[in-house]
Amino acid sequence: MFNVVEMLACRALLMKDGDRVSIRSRNNKELTNDYPTILAGAKRMNAKSAVVDGEIVAVDSAGCPSFQVLQHRRAQPGHAIAFYAFDVLHMNGSDLTSEPLENRRERLPMLLENTGLLVSSERRGSAAQVTAAVSGLGLEGVVAKRRETVLIVKRQSRSRGRTVSRFSGRRTRGE
């Protein structure tokens, strides 16, 4: 199993296409102008094009995430805003969703090198060990996935003149 720590955060996709970059929420809300430091980092990703799945997190000086601060970050400027990537779905014109999660994650360090964007950490151990460690840190939780997981992508019907992709589920090869 592959255990990825979940923080008190806003799930987001970074989408780079040449010089254009956008940041979208899980509900397809435009976030690009709300997070200038993440935008700057995404522009420096080491690929001509990429779609990266991750979380936007407000972190205090002790490294503790706060969703409340993220929602009201202008009123509490003492926190850093960070992007933690946990998956790369497309890169340089290639759809990576049919590759195992482990292979997709192996691309993240090179893709994010010198960008200021971070790769989410993996926690090894039994479910009880990982849960206890994450709980002890005051984090939101853990998502456990099989290393061989591939994505199933479904397209929504046209809505307001645009087509939106939704990631509807995960499966492993052979299922």
Image (tube, rainbow, N blue to C red):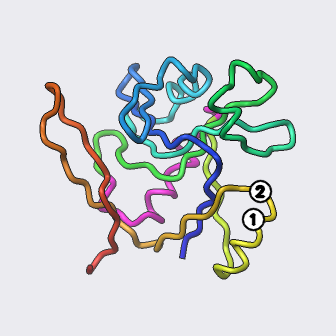
Query: What amino acid is found at the position of numbered circle 2 in the picture?
Result: Gly
Which residue corresponds to mark 1? 135
Is 138 magenta? The answer is: no
Crowding around mark 1 (Cα neighbors within 10 Å: few <14, some 14 to 19, many 20+) is few
**Residue 160 as seen in the image, left or right of residue 128:** left
Instruction: Please state which of residues 14 and 48 is positioned toward the viewer in this rendering.
Output: 14
As rendered, which of 69 and 165 lies closer to the eye?
69
Neighbor class of circle 2 (other Cα within 10 Å; few <14, some 14-19, many 20+) is some
- Residue 14's x, y, as percent? 45, 35
> Is mark 2 in CB contact (under 8 Å) with mark 1?
yes
Amino acid beneath label 1: Ser
The range drawn in magenta is 96-116
Q: Looking at the image, how many numbered discs can be counted on the residues? A: 2
- The residue at which mark 2 appears reads as 138
Q: Hey, which quadrant is residue 97 in on the image?
A: bottom left
Q: Residue at x 35, y 28 (%)?
A: 17
| Secondary structure under the numbered disc 1 in the rendered image | helix
Within the image, what quadrant is residue 152 found in? bottom left
Tell me, for residue 4, which label it has, or none: none
- Foreground residue, 106 or 155? 155
Q: Residue 135, how many percent across, how many down?
A: 75, 65
Residue 70 against residue 139 in the figure, above or below: above
Seen at 66% across and 56% down, the residue is 140
C-alpha distance separating marks 2 and 1: 5 Å
Q: Which residue: 41% across, 41% down? A: 26
